[in-house]
Image (cartoon, rainbow, N blue to C red):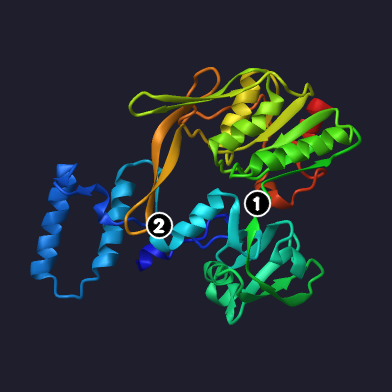
């Protein structure tokens, strides 16, 4: 693929994975006896014949197939379904498993700026001295100012065991060139800290594989440290695995349904919690970037009256996706299930409203990952709620 892969970098990017643009081959609907969807097959065959007979330029069949497939998925009108090209599938798969190959940081970016928001434990970046708040200025001959953030991020990603030199600007204004070896790293998905001698705070970045174990480790550490109440932060959490979300919820809820998933044929998968749980006051921080599993995490606690939700209204995602790898190595991440809260509610295009609404200013939103407890009004209200 050509231009289809030249995508603008999203607000939050993990450098552990290659930039995923996405496409699938046009054979997604083609079977040995023809197209399942006649309208699609008829139109594409007409175009193919016309191009073969009349087009005076050079035909790149693979590129055309990528665009045709990308258009098919886009034509579904489902913003949650996506396509992954073969060269990006391994990085995509690893990310879902809570791993990635790179230097081990997450960043926020503009067209010409990259700032580190999170450094993974025991990662090449951590060992080289990269810290949260550092600006990545470039790598090799590439710079964010001259070549853009997307090019720099793509160049930093690479194969395990290979060296990469990253130019960073520290908080004191000094500029350093740090060389490190790319490695397979485990994402930092959930961690905790004591806000004071009574209130424990747990941040959940996503619900990829391994999140539940990291969450339970953080929870145990906080209760061992004497936490008498909890603030759990799922703001700017894009979701992840339902099983990880359910496992993280289990120690917080009594016996009952956590979530129900229903497929096209009507079959259901029900996730439940057992009776054992901690009995502490809980506040959950949510915002419009709390998506999918993050919303259902908060919704379950709200419906069981186990937590007060603080922040702003969530996105409203009501479909679960499964990834299907195709014969050429590409894949389709397709919406195949609807999911429902413990009370049977769909959050599709509705989301959940906080019990206590607290908005951030535009400046606070822009600097979300660098707010401190003292400069974060949503966190301050949550502390007040459980304190």
SS for dot 2 = loop
Q: Residue furthest left?
A: 53
Element type at mark 1: helix
Which image quadrant: the C terminus? top right
- In this rendering, the answer to whether 341 lies above or below 223 is above
Residue 248 appears in the figure: yes
Q: Residue 223's spot in the image, x, y percent?
A: 84, 32
Indicate whether 66 appears above or below 142. above
User: Which image quadrant for residue 273?
Assistant: top right
Q: Residue furthest bottom?
A: 141
The residue under the point 80% across, 26% down is: 386
State whether residue 372 is above or below residue 20.
above
Instruction: Say which of 335 and 278 sits in front.
Output: 278
Q: Can residue 134 be seen by looking at this rendering?
A: no
From what the image shows, is residue 288 above or below residue 59?
above
Tell me if 102 is positioned left or right of 54 in this view.
right
State the residue at coordinates (65%, 29%): 249
Image quadrant where residue 60 sits: bottom left
Q: Residues within 10 Å of mark 1 (few under 14, many from 20)?
A: few
Left or right: 276, with 318 as reference point: right
Q: How far apart are the two marked residues, 1 and 2, measured between alpha carbons?
A: 27 Å
Q: Earlier in the sequence, mark 1 or mark 2?
A: 2
Q: Residue under label 1, please give it.
A: 366
Q: Residue 313 appears in which quarter of the rendering?
A: top right
Q: Position of residue 316 (x, y in %)?
A: 50, 33
Q: Could you say which is closer to the camera, residue 165 or residue 302?
A: 165
Tell me if mark 2 has few (under 14), some (14-19) or many (20+) residues whose alpha carbon lies within 10 angstroms of its own.
Answer: many
Q: Position of residue 365 (x, y in %)?
A: 66, 47
> Which residue is disc 2 drawn over?
22
Q: Residue at x 54, y 54 (%)?
A: 94
Furthest-right residue in this view: 197
Residue 192: x and y in percent read 78, 42
């Amino acid at each position: 693929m050509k231009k289809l892969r030249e995508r603008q970098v999203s607000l939050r990017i993990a450098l552990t994975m290659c930039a995923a643009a996405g496409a699938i081959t046009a054979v997604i609907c083609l079977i040995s006896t023809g197209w399942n969807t006649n309208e699609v097959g008829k139109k594409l065959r007409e175009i193919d014949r016309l191009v073969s007979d009349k087009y005076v330029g050079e035909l790149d069949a693979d590129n055309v197939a990528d665009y045709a497939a990308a258009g098919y998925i886009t034509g579904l009108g489902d913003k949650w379904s996506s396509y992954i090209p073969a060269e990006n599938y391994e990085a995509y798969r690893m990310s879902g498993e809570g791993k990635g190959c790179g230097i081990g940081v997450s960043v926020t970016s503009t067209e010409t700026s990259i700032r580190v928001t999170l450094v993974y434990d025991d990662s090449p970046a951590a060992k080289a001295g990269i810290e949260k708040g550092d600006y990545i200025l470039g790598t090799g001959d590439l710079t964010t100012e001259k070549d853009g953030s997307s090019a720099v991020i793509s160049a930093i990603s690479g194969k395990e065991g290979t060296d990469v030199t990253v130019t960073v600007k520290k908080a004191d204004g000094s500029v350093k060139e740090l060389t490190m070896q790319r490695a397979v790293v485990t994402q930092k998905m959930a961690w905790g800290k004591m806000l004071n001698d009574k209130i424990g705070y747990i941040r959940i970045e996503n619900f990829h594989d391994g999140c539940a174990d990291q969450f339970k480790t953080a929870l145990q550490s906080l209760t061992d440290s004497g936490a008498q109440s909890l603030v759990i932060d799922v703001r700017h959490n894009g979701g992840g695995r339902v099983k990880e979300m359910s496992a993280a919820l289990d120690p917080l809820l009594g016996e009952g349904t956590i979530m129900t998933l229903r497929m096209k044929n009507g079959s259901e998968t029900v996730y439940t919690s057992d009776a054992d749980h901690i009995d502490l006051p809980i506040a959950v921080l949510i915002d419009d970037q709390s998506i999918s599993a993050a919303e259902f995490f908060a919704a379950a606690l709200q419906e069981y009256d186990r937590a007060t939700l603080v922040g702003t209204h969530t996105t409203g995602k009501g479909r679960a996706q499964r990834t299907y790898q195709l014969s050429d190595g590409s894949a389709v991440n397709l919406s195949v299930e609807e999911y429902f809260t413990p009370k049977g509610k769909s959050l599709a295009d509705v989301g959940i409203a906080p019990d206590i609404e607290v908005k951030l200013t535009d400046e606070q939103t822009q600097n979300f990952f660098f707010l401190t407890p003292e400069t974060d009004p949503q966190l301050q209200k949550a502390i007040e709620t459980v304190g």
